[in-house]
Amino acid sequence: MLTEADLTEIKVGLSKIDVQGERLPEAVLKMTGH
Amino acid sequence: MQKRILGKDLEVSAIGFGAMSFASTYGPAGDHDEALKVIRGAYDLGVTFFDTAEAYGPFTNEELVGEALQPIRDKVVIATKFGFDIDLATGKRNGGTNSRPEHVKAVAEAALKRLRTDHIDLLYQHRVDQAVPIEDTVGALKNLIAEGKVRHYGLSEAGVNTIRRAHAVHPMTAVQSEYSMFWRGPEAELLPALGELGIGFVPFSPLGAGFLTGQINENTKFDSNDFRNAVPRFSPEARKANMALVDIVKAVAERKGATPAQVALAWLLAQRPWIVPIPGTKSSPASTRTWAAQLSCSPRPT
């Protein structure tokens, strides 16, 4: 069981991390979000 | 495995199976018979929602999924996608997109044959075609739904404005885009809009293309054909910097006696009750077990 406390712990942890690097190559990214 | 509802009434397993990994995306496709075992093994573990696309291969992934699921066709939900400009006769990729109504119809007809079925449960536009109004494309999908060849439709990696325009033409069942702890872009605009419109969400790469499993670090060498070699966040430097993310997942997993993959998926399932992630694997049926045992959670209501 993933509890509210676990989710809060993850949320706090994620808030301190700035993920490095784009998720896709530039040409592929250009095809998204339209 | 628990069930979830996408859109108004498409019931699927809470975790689906993304079959893209069999299409050389993550290195060599592997043995055909083993692939059949992996897909059927996912069903044996409770998965009833399977995702493929015309573009995976192209064509070969739909053929594989169709062969694997033919014996249990009435027990599963099959999703596939159209939308790239691929020659229907030769499989040659012409580059770019093609969602002209006549092409949508032709791709759907071809997909039905490859999937060995008389209907596609969920047909997505793979990428928005900026040369074709979305209303025209959805009009073609609406015709396929009226003919009984398609049951539901969706969009993949589309923007909120396009989703709203499409949904106004015909109610949409699901949007598929990347979402995980590794990429949280959908949280700002997409998820609130989908909640408002009653559209389900199907995150691909829910395990961050493998990163959140804890099996990848800065020293990992990918196969020369693996697409991650060309992805900036998988450069050795980025992987080293992003290990802090994996550490969070691992810490929770160890405390719970679970795998990092299970925690990453449970986190996704907790975000909304209408989110259905589609992890994949090509290695073995046993590999599927590392994530198919679902950690329970209480999703946010909206």
Image: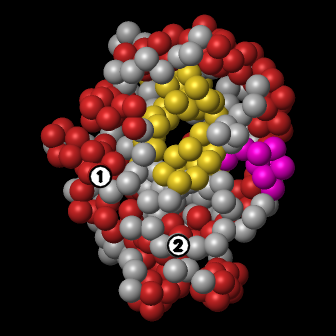
Q: Is residue B72 above or below residue B247?
A: above
On the image, numbered disc 2 is attached to which residue?
Answer: B296
> Which secondary structure, mark 1?
helix
Q: Nearer the viewer, residue B81 or B292?
A: B292
Q: Is residue B71 left or right of residue B100?
A: left
Residue B184's x, y, as percent?
66, 64
The crowding category of the residue bearing disc 2, from other C-alpha atoms within 10 Å (few below 14, some 14 to 19, many at least 20), is: some
Residue B54's x, y, as percent?
44, 27
Picture residue at 58% right of the left edge, 26% below the top: B151
Distance of label 1 from label 2 (alpha carbons): 19 Å
Picture residue at 72% right of the left edge, 44% below the top: B199
> Which secondary structure, mark 2?
loop
Could you tell which of marks 1 and 2 lies nearer the N-terminus?
1
Residue B139's x, y, as percent?
72, 16
**Residue B286, picture quadrant:** bottom left
Residue B86 appearing in the image:
no
Q: Chain of mark 1?
A: B
- Residue type at the position of mark 2: Ser
Q: Which quadrant holds the N terminus of chain B?
A: bottom left
Q: Chain of mark 2?
A: B
Magenta stretch encompasses residue B197: yes
